[in-house]
Amino acid sequence: MINELEESSNKLAEGERQGAWREMAKQVAHEIKNPLTPMKLSLQHLQYAIQRNDPNIETKIKKTTELLINQIDSLSKMAEEFSAFAKMPEAQMEPVVLNDILDESVQLFEKEENCTIIYNPLTNWVKVNVDPHQLGRVFANILKNGIQAIPEGAKGEIKVYCKLNEGKITIYFEDNGKGISDELGKKIFSPNFSTKNSGMGLGLAISRKIIEQFSGVIDYTSIPEKRQHFYVVLPVIIN
């Protein structure tokens, strides 16, 4: 009986390890997948600008290459962390300018053909204590979800803006997608839940975990069949 219990315990532990690896692999695949399509789109727009001898080609090359290099650095960091420690990267907290991270995230998706991003950047510099790579992935995930929520054949619109209040900054991502019903809203931050057939349901669950590491909040409000907006609240570094 003792031998059988030990064998059962070993099998259970092995099953848990395999399950953890599968979950981890899904998370890494999801985080890597998000920026690839807009990166490709940015390169295609640059290629088109070169072909038609755009007069502002040097500026566009500089802007696009800087954007792609930053995204590649972020993905490389995740791959290195996963390879070295076989786990999602731990947050490397540092004081950063929120404006830069948000600007870059919007630039990454602003060339989407079926969606217009209306961006009201911050007028003053705002510093937050976060992992800049992880925060950028959260913003990318929210923007990607907003674009995918647009009904087929409709013209999408995403408004990105911020509000500063009592030592906290709230970043809003408001889209004119299908909205979220109350029933689905209860599950939206749960792992492995997705309203998209191609989705793995890990993006928002990961995003919530990341934002909570920054002592922040991520949530949403929605008017079903009309619009929805996600928002991220972060404490601000007061100089």
Image: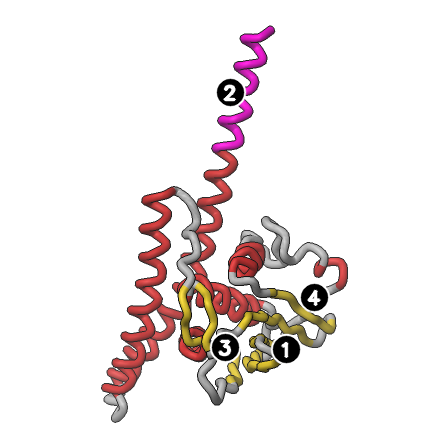
* Residue for badge 3: 238
Q: Earlier in the sequence, mark 2 or mark 4?
A: 2
* Residue for badge 4: 180
* Residue for badge 1: 176
Residues 166 and 31: in front is: 166
Within 10 Å of the Cα at label 3, are there few (<14), some (14-19), or many (20+) other Cα atoms?
few
Residues 122 and 16: in front is: 122
Residue 106, compared with residue 54, is above or below; it is: above
Q: Is residue 13 magenta?
A: yes
Residues 171 and 72: in front is: 171
Q: Amino acid at mark 1?
A: Asn
Q: Amino acid at mark 2?
A: Asn
Q: Amino acid at mark 4?
A: Ile
Q: Earlier in the sequence, mark 4 or mark 3?
A: 4
Query: How has the structure been colored for display?
Result: secondary structure
Q: Does any portion of residue 28 appear in the rendered image?
A: yes
**Does dot 1 land on a helix, a strand or a loop?**
loop
